[in-house]
Image: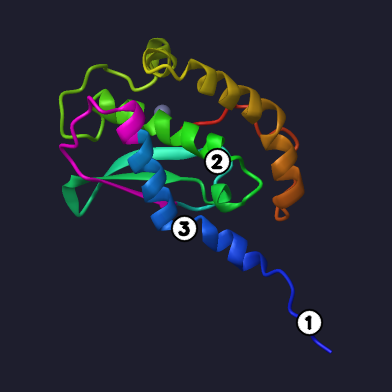
Amino acid sequence: MYIRCIDAIYYLGMRDQAWLQQQLGEIWRLHFPDVQERNPVRIMFGRRAYRRLGSISTDPQDPEQTIIRVTGWFQYPQIPVEIVRSVIVHEMCHYAHGFHSGGAQQHTYPHAGGVIRREFAERDLEELYDRQQEWLREEWPKFLRKHYKGNYIKNPNKKGNKQ
Ligand SMILES: [Zn+2]
């Protein structure tokens, strides 16, 4: 007798493209209302990268289309939504600074001089920033050791995570 129980795919499916776009919309509305959407932003899950957790780029086919990608690992329900959101906030900070946004670039380098941390702080999200750092240090390696079957990762944070 075959009894179909809880389907893992169902849980993975809960965090889909629409869910991600909704997260971005909420974050924009709540924390970046001053930032004009010059270039429309599409957000998607990328490949399951464990060092590069997020990225922002311009669509090579369309220079007026911005693309934010977050690691495919973030589809797993074990990753707190807060962490997914913190990576989206990070990419939105780049956008607010004029990187891949169609606006004027405010800094020469996207991460120099603690500009991301400062941007979180100015938007009342310093606590989220600190929680993200702590989670990446404490929990992310544990998650990867459990789920990254292909290759055992001794110290995934050795070189630091990129966003
Ligand atoms: Zn970054």
**Which amino acid type is shown beneath numbered disc 1?**
Ile
Q: Which residue lies furthest to the bottom in this view?
A: 1
61, above or below 131, in the image = below
Residue behind mark 3: 16
Q: Which residue is drawn at 57% across and 18% down?
A: 130
The image shows residue 7 at horizontal and vertical percentages of: 67, 70
Q: Is mark 1 on a helix, strand or loop?
A: loop
Choose the circle earlier in sequence order: 1 or 2: 1
In the visual, does 44 lie left or right of 32? right
- Give the position of the N terminus as an image quadrant: bottom right
Q: Is mark 2 on a helix, strand or loop?
A: helix
Estimate the spatial distance between the alpha carbons at disc 3 and disc 2, rounded to whole Å: 13 Å
- Circle 1/circle 2 CB separation < 8 Å: no
47, above or below 90, in the image = below
Q: How crowded is mark 3: few (under 14 residues within 10 Å), some or many (20 or more)?
A: some
Q: Residue at x 30, y 41 (%)?
A: 57
The image shows residue 158 at horizontal and vertical percentages of: 65, 27
Along the viewing direction, whichever of 64 and 120 lies nearer the viewer: 120
Estimate the spatial distance between the alpha carbons at disc 1 and disc 2, rounded to whole Å: 31 Å
In the visual, does 4 lie left or right of 23? right
Residue behind mark 2: 81
The region drawn magenta spans 28-45
**Which amino acid type is shown beneath numbered disc 2?**
Val
In the visual, does 64 lie left or right of 91? left
